[in-house]
Image (cartoon, helix red, strand yellow):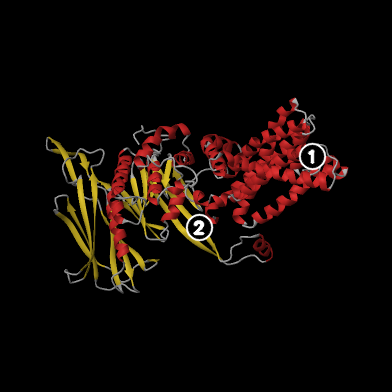
Amino acid sequence: MVVSPALEIVRYRSLLRNLVAKDLKVRYKNSALGFVWSLLNPLLLMLVFTFVFTQLLDQQIPDFPVFVLTALLPWTWTATAVSVGTSTLIDNAPLINKVYFPRYLLPVSVVMSTGMNFVLGLPALFLLMAVFGRPFTQWMLYIPVIILVQGIFLMALVLFLAPLHVHLRDTMVVVDVGLTAWFFLTPILYSVEMIVPELAAWMYRINPMAAIVAEYRTILYEGGVPDPLFMGRTGVTALIMLVLAYLFFKRLNRNIGEHL
Amino acid sequence: MALPRRRTQRADVAVEFRDVSRRFMLYHERRNSFQDWFIGLIRPRGNAEEFWALRDVSFSVGWGESLGVLGRNGAGKSTLLKLVTHILEPTSGEISLNGDTHAMLELGAGFHPELSGRDNVYLNGSIYGHDRQTMAERIDSIVEFADLEQFIDTPVKHYSSGMFMRLGFAIAVHMDPEILVIDEVLAVGDANFQAKSHRALHQLKDQGTTILFVSHNAEQVRSFCDKAILLENGRLIDSGKAEDVVDHYERLLAGSSGTDSMELMRLRVLDRDGRSAETVIGGDDIEFEALLRVSGDSIPGDLTLGIDVYDADGVHLFGRSSAVPTELPMNEVDGGKLATAKGRIHRMPIRSGELHLVATLQRAGDAEQVLGRSETNVDVTPPAISAERGMLHLDQEWHWAADGRVQVDQKDGK
């Protein structure tokens, strides 16, 4: 039940690769500048937030641009993966109605292509870190693990939302509103340490993105040591969510052709 | 196309449907938003209408056979296609597909407009489970077949619809499937390309590709398929040799000629299980069935149905007629009622050869007015173990005699 999709992914790996390549190519329209455009949104937000928090509000966080971008980049991955992923089954309705292939490859490929986008944006962050003289430590080698955990978490989320959107077409509206709320409820513009201590524990428990963002920030902004136990817990939670979401996806998707 | 055939699995048949049904629920109010969903929690929606797009459909396609699927609009052809290709799952029944399947449901399905023709070839290939290397080996041949050498690196959004379809067709015939499902796509492009695609499909067929061809074009099925099935209102109403089923379909399309009349739709030979058969064993019972369609409320009282049997040379072997009773059990379908007349010839005295059966429906007493005529051929094959020779199967005995005492040694026939 859970092993067979893994085998199927191996069998359809070239489809997965082509779907990811298609997403990236279409987004960048085969132009070199296209990729820069995709970085523009988080960079612009970083500038706006820096202006608001350091000039208008006089926030005492050192090197605020690095502080906010370390959280903003992974958040952009989450936000685009969730919003593009939720509508991916409907966007690909003509294909779904004409050819059989494992349907979960569509949401999975969205998470992967937006993830590629995130990884390609990391050098911009490194550049900013160098400009502000933030430390580069050996703990940065731990980043791929966090990326993996975030990827699994996003796949779970998208596998749950995409079929729901097929059945309830206003899921997208709820997702849009939810993403905005989620953005402010995740320690992006502030750090976990600034939260009332008893609520901070709760935030970690309910919001996996809080743990994920905090880990990126610990390593990239503070140059600190990641907490492997903490990430392990988030990773296991994400894996359990992925299995449940996959089963949910299978169940709702049985006769998806009828609803598209 | 010129690649060696590989078989992933061997099973007796390539495709098999066993009592497959597919139901659709037609909701008059769809619960498609959260608001509707909340309302639904309080007030359960009542009026959902059941619609059976397919009902108890059973058939099988042997390896290398080409099966035509015929039926009018709404007969269930599209549902059947989507079931074969796994796009839909059956409500009940079982479907076996015993090999790699490629479906040509819509040429160019899955093309992305922003990608070049070349990228789309790879993308399309991978949708059907072919890796990059396999596609790299075939791409030149695909491009050549589609006549798109100049445009293959242009985004397909700039293609004309003809170019688009040509590329889709070229990809499909180069996928080297074991089972190919085609939905009326033979009419693609100009006459030149049509001839080319015809040749390609015939070549695939000659290589042993199993083909399921869905069409409402009777002539395409007649010329291309070995066998055919006919769907009507979701039910399989006929199956057998393509030419016979096409004749039946054409009669169905022609419609009834007036009120209170009866038409002869099809004569067919049945095997022991009641399925349409093309061969019978010499000396066995032969069963035949005439499908009749009645329009209007009642059956006219002056009809006779005749059955005549001829051999391959046209020698009239047997014939009989009988009056059609005015009370017949009938199956109601839209636009008419179906009735069947079954007959059985016991221990048919033919051992081997081809028989030509003709059913004739006419008004009694007036041999000139033939209302309908349907023919079919059946091959009689000799029983596997038999010491007999010749065309006839006779009830005979063989005696060995000595000293005037007669002893029966062998007796053939039943």
Which quadrant holds the N terminus of chain B? top left
The one nearer the camera, B229 or B303, is B229
Chain letter belonging to callout 1: A
Tell me the CA gap for discs 2 and 1: 60 Å
Packing grade of label 1 (10 A; few <14, some 14-19, many >=20) is: many
Q: Residue furthest right?
A: A197
User: Which residue lies under the disc numbered 2?
Assistant: B23
Q: Amino acid at mark 2?
A: Arg
Secondary structure, mark 2, is: strand
- Let me know if residue B269 appears in the view: no
In this image, B284 relative to A139: left or right?
Answer: left
Q: Which residue is mark 1?
A: A64
Q: Which of pointers 2 and 1 indicates the residue nearer the eye?
A: 1
Q: Residue at point 58% right, 40% down?
A: A33
Residue B177 location, x and y as percent?
A: 40, 39
Q: Which residue type does callout 1 highlight?
A: Phe
Indicate the quadrant where residue B200 lies: top left
The outermost residue toward the top is A138
Element assignment for label 1? helix
Q: Nearer the viewer, residue B396 or B199?
A: B199
* In the image: residue B95, left or right of residue B292: right
In the rendered image of this protein, does residue A73 appear above or below residue B55?
A: above
User: Please, is residue B54 above or below residue A29 in the view?
Assistant: below
Instruction: Report the side of B54 relative to A213 (left or right).
Output: left
User: Quick check: A231 above or below A248?
Assistant: above
Chain identifier of the residue bearing label 2 in the image: B
Q: Does residue B363 appear in this view?
A: yes
Residue B2, picture quadrant = top left
Numbered circles on residues, count: 2
What is the x, y in percent for residue B382? 23, 42
In the displayed image of the protein, which residue is found farthest to the left? B404
